[in-house]
Image: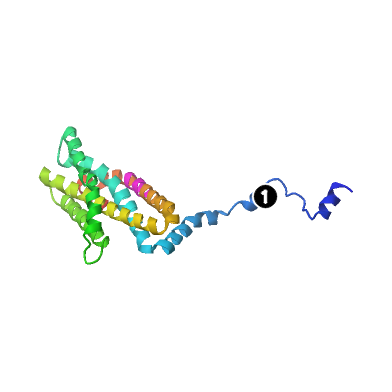
Amino acid sequence: MDSLESKDLLGQSPPLPFGGAARRATPSLFSILLEPFQWIEMLCRELNTSFVLGVVLVYGLSQGFAGSFFRVVTDFYWKDVQKVQPSTVQMYIGLYYIPWIVKPIWGILTDMFPVRGYRRRPYFLLAGILGTSTTLVISTHGQLPVPLALLCLVGISAGIAIADVTIDACIARNSIDHPGLAPDMQSLCSSVSSIGALVGYSSSGILVRHLGAQVGGNSSV
C-alpha cells in the first residue's frame, strides 16, 4: 500500500500548498484596523464610557497635547514677548514643576474633601477652570508684568497636574475593581498621551509661527 492510500485510510488530507496555512491564518486589513475600536468599545462597556472619555481628555488632550504645546510655546513667550534672558527662563521653568511636586496634596484633597458627595468631578472642573482662565489671561492681554505672567503659567501647569492626579485616582480605583483590565488601562493612558504629545509637538511650531507665541498659546487648553 503506497503512502497516498495510507493517508486516505487514516482520514488525513493532503498538505496545503506552500504558504496556504499562512494565508488562511492571516487576518484581513479591515479586521486589523477595526481591532483598536473594538478594544475601546470593550473598555467602555466594562469600565464606563465617562471614565474612558476622562482618560482620553486628561492624558490625551491635557497632559499629552497641552503639556507638549505648553513646553514649546512658553519658551517663545519669554523670549519674544517678555524679552527675558535664557538663564532667567530656566529658573522660571523650574517653577512650573511646583504643582507636580505637590501632587500628593491634590490626591489627599480629592480623597478627604468631597464636594457635595463627589470626590473627583469637582476637581476635574477646578482643573479645567484654572487652566482655561489663566490661559485666557496670558493670551488675550498685552505684555503682562513678569510676576503675573509667571503666575498664569504656573496656574496652567497646576490645572494639568490636578486633572492628572484626579484621573490617576480613578484609574487606581478601577484597577482594584477590575484587576484583569489594569494593563489595558495603562495601555490606554500611554497610547492617548503619546498621540496627544505627537500632535502637540507637531503643531506647536506652525501655530507659533502664524499666530505668535502669545496668541498661539491659547490653543494649548
Q: Is residue 75 magenta?
A: no
**How is the structure coloured here?**
rainbow
Mostly what secondary structure, the magenta segment? helix
Please, which residue is most extreme toward the bottom here?
116
Location of residue 3 with respect to 120 vertically, above or below? above
- The residue that appears at 22% across and 45% down in the rendered structure is 213
Residue situated in front as seen by the camera: 48 or 70: 48
User: Across the whole image, how many numbered discs are drawn on residues?
Assistant: 1
Secondary-structure class at tag 1:
helix
Q: Is residue 90 visible?
A: yes
Residue that appears at 28% across and 47% down: 67
Residue at (32, 48) in percent of width and height: 64
Residue on which the image places disc 1 = 21
Q: Is residue 103 left or right of residue 201?
A: left
The reply, left or right, for residue 48 in relation to residue 8 is left
Q: Position of residue 192 (x, y in %)?
A: 38, 51
Q: Nearer the viewer, residue 214 or 221?
A: 221
Q: Is residue 197 magenta?
A: yes
Spot occupied by residue 116 in the image (x, y as percentages of width and height): 22, 67
Residue 158 on image: x %, y %: 21, 50
The residue positioned farthest toward the top in the image shown: 87
- Span of residues in magenta: 195-201
Taking 199 as reference, is 170 above or below it? below
Most extreme residue toward the right is 1
Residue 127 in view (yes/no): no
Residue at the image point whose x is 25% and y is 50% from the top: 161
Q: Amino acid at mark 1?
A: Ala
